[in-house]
Amino acid sequence: DLPFVLISGPCQIESRDHALFMADALAKSATDAGVPFIFKSSFDKANRTSVSGKRGVGIDAGLAILAEVKAKLGCPVLTDIHGPEQVDAAAQAVDILQIPAFLCRQTDLLIAAGKTGAVINVKKGQFLAPWDMAAVAQKVASTGNERILLTERGASFGYNTLVSDMRALPVMAETGYPVVFDATHSVQQPGGLGSASGGQRDYAPLLARSAVAAGVAAIFAEAHEDPDNAPSDGPVMLKLDWVGPMLKQLKAIDRVVKG
Amino acid sequence: DLPFVLISGPCQIESRDHALFMADALAKSATDAGVPFIFKSSFDKANRTSVSGKRGVGIDAGLAILAEVKAKLGCPVLTDIHGPEQVDAAAQAVDILQIPAFLCRQTDLLIAAGKTGAVINVKKGQFLAPWDMAAVAQKVASTGNERILLTERGASFGYNTLVSDMRALPVMAETGYPVVFDATHSVQQPGGLGSASGGQRDYAPLLARSAVAAGVAAIFAEAHEDPDNAPSDGPVMLKLDWVGPMLKQLKAIDRVVKG
Amino acid sequence: DLPFVLISGPCQIESRDHALFMADALAKSATDAGVPFIFKSSFDKANRTSVSGKRGVGIDAGLAILAEVKAKLGCPVLTDIHGPEQVDAAAQAVDILQIPAFLCRQTDLLIAAGKTGAVINVKKGQFLAPWDMAAVAQKVASTGNERILLTERGASFGYNTLVSDMRALPVMAETGYPVVFDATHSVQQPGGLGSASGGQRDYAPLLARSAVAAGVAAIFAEAHEDPDNAPSDGPVMLKLDWVGPMLKQLKAIDRVVKG
Amino acid sequence: DLPFVLISGPCQIESRDHALFMADALAKSATDAGVPFIFKSSFDKANRTSVSGKRGVGIDAGLAILAEVKAKLGCPVLTDIHGPEQVDAAAQAVDILQIPAFLCRQTDLLIAAGKTGAVINVKKGQFLAPWDMAAVAQKVASTGNERILLTERGASFGYNTLVSDMRALPVMAETGYPVVFDATHSVQQPGGLGSASGGQRDYAPLLARSAVAAGVAAIFAEAHEDPDNAPSDGPVMLKLDWVGPMLKQLKAIDRVVKG
């Protein structure tokens, strides 16, 4: 029942300067609201809807930027990894390794990640029930690493739509691991734009409020100063200036719920 | 952005004494929490899972009891109706006529109910999208009666399961009509017990919190002093002594959200 | 394991002449394919998406037309009923009373229909699992009337979409009652056109083939000589000249499956 | 509109002798039914529900066995690959590289596989709409390799359940690539047994019939002489002696549909 944490950043690392700018701005909003902050950004978007979607700066450049953000801002840093060969380098640069939702059942990746000793944040696959995540977490825990986070990011609901079942949060919390609610990917409309995923950014703060009211350890929400022109996840990312007011509301709800 | 209202009562009218007991207890909890209260109970359960499920006290006895609750407690009273032939008698006894979810597309019932001039609460069918409710409300409004409430009570999600999409609340609110979240039917597991519907009472307060955090005009939640032995909806009804503490939390979240 | 039957006709009775024209044309196609034929048409569309959708010719005119079709063509006739007060008149005019999907849990309607002694075709609600239909059928059977048909017409799948789970057919057949597959309502997109339901007529013959291959007692498929200008269900009804070729394919598949 | 092909084999390679035994038995059944045959088996099960699920014989042993099956039986051979580092070795041993459903959006894997020039069978993710597969196929085709198959294996439908939407088959066929229906994974109940996936083997032949009636290029169906004791996918695999009779029915339906 600790106060909730914010995990935020731009979907992908666009440049060193952009990452530092975003991390600085988000850290300030979080500090203002009294919310601990973890910076998130990806060095590679490995499963874009289209082959022509922008992939990112790559692992070497990306990890260097993330390490610099961590050093300069003093905040923990999270990034996602896509294959067992990436985990060691990533674990040296960042605090939290994230397993993408589509890959949450890939045993080798979970075990390789777990063995680094880093905190492992596993996103729940859109195709899984919340209780299925116990077996997923167990794959990581089998390495002796119990520093596990589990993230809800929506469940498949018909075609091109996700739905957020708030009951998933307490169900996953029964594992004993902290539960994160990903407010921006939960409003994704997978494949909804034909060659890209659509989204409903406007509903992300609402779902974040609902999740905090249900009770979570952290809110994950990507943000961008100009999401409509971002290279990925534009339709779902929060506008940067929404973050501060949203956090204040979330903080007040969190206090009510956790007493 | 008025403070939220509680709509509560036992699923069905079991007896005059029980209805008065429940109404009194719920009204006290609501007053304590500073929440306006509307009493709800059914005189007939017209669509039980099984033919042997208890139906209720019937329309004449039921409406008389509801009128007495209204007179004694001084609170508005709501009941559900199942055919056009019931609307006039019901509208004389109660303040709000409720259209059951399965019947939310039955034009004759909506129009007959609308013509009484009573407030009409239409539950969204488990088979409808939230935006589909605009055409449903329009059927009532075509009678000149704009005193309409729209209630979310879960959407079909695979078999024997409902899911509460919190985005449905603002979508329905775009109609301009107040939106209610039904926290207890939303945790129903339709047909989940074979010859009866199952449910997850424990998650109802959580969904109520999430809905209030999303922003609603009212929370609908059935309650009972001994739900495990209630003649209907036992698996989903709140225990009576949960109501007071829940309302205090909801009230605090409502204040945060509505500023 | 009897050969499959066709239940077909225009969604609603548009006029005496149109009903006779359609019944005659469909009966000829069925005879050509060696398929027994039941004529279906509605006297009232009681749950249109919009209040301005055309309702139909009404019960008195409609039942008279259906009785005339039955007399002239010599085929059994089916129509749907919407309230207990309609069942007696309808049962005098037609052979099969159909319970609409939204109303499949309304106990009074099921029992009133059952008591007429007519064959009762209950459509499975879009919100029900196939195994839930056993309790529905039991409501009818509680009247002593075991002449029951159960119809699959799609299950809710996200918003504005239905999906046909072919496993539902054998599951419902475990009740011992003949199972019908409704190929045209299964391609409905409920509410998909805003103030009307959309549909995917082109996929109806495909789903009919799949259902016959799974094994069914009857195929239900509405048809019209000019569906794009029909007053209801235009987007899903078969074009009249599709029926003959479709039946020949279905007949051949039925023979393979039933040996 | 070529006659349909069978893709079958035991879920995983258990041993050289078992693979040869199964391939021989299945090839005989296929020849008897006049159906071309492709042998399928996995050298590694990379995404088991539980960390303690059996993984398989490994890539070196597995590819050697598959090459021997191909040489001895003279049939094409298919296996699934899980990372870009596996594609070259696999493409030397087998004819068709299969991309698992969970990995169907992993750009690097699709491109690496495509570059081998082998036939690539991409399984549709349980979280994708059928029209989303056009962008997936395009990732492979961007390598210049147009030898692509697309496989339907069920879509997420609530929790722990998949549903087979037969309309997905023609939708995917609009890409111009041959479409395969996976009849055994489509009856999987993901995570349904807690630490393993459940399944409904009994419905697999029914779904295969429905899919052939809808029109497909191939039926994929895993089989085993003793599925209840198989190391993986036991609840869904066909019993070996079901295969022959099923193929004869499917062949007859295929003839009806393809004229």
Image (cartoon, coloured by chain):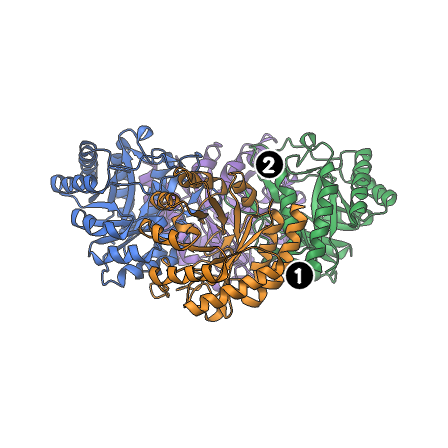
Chain colours: A blue, B purple, C green, D orange
The answer to whether one can see residue B234 in this image is: no
Task: Residue B117: name its quadrant.
Answer: top right
Question: Rounded to the nearest whole Å, what is the CA distance between mark 2 and mark 1?
Answer: 31 Å
What is the three-letter code of the residue carrying label 1? Gln
The correct choice, above or below, for B124 with respect to D183 in the image is: above
Residue D142: x %, y % from top left: 39, 37
The residue pinned by badge 1 equals C138
Q: How packed is label 2: few (under 14 Cα within 10 Å), some, or many (20 or more)?
A: many
Q: Give residue C174's position: percent from left, percent from top.
A: 64, 63
Q: Secondary structure at mark 1?
A: helix
Q: Residue drawn 61% across and 55% down?
A: D209
Which residue is found at the position 45% from the left and 69% from the top? Answer: D18
Numbered mark located on residue B202 in the image: none
> Whole-percent x and y of residue B158?
50, 52
Chain containing mark 2: C
Q: Are marks 2 and 1 in contact (CB under 8 Å)?
A: no
Task: Report whether mark 2 lies on the same chain as mark 1.
Answer: yes
Crowd band around label 1 with a 10 angstrom C-alpha radius: few (<14), some (14–19), many (20+): many
Give x and y (percent) for residue B176: 47, 31
Q: Chain of mark 1?
A: C
The tag earlier along the polypeptide, 2 or 1, is: 1
Select label 2 or label 1 by which is in front.
2
Q: Type of residue at label 2?
A: Ser
Residue D76 visible? The answer is yes
Check the image and report above or below for B138 versus D13. above
Question: In which image quadrant can residue B122 be found?
Answer: top right
- Name the quadrant containing residue A231: top left
Quickly name the residue at label 2: C197
- In this rendering, position of residue D230 left or right of residue A9: right
Q: Which one is in front, C231 or A121? A: A121
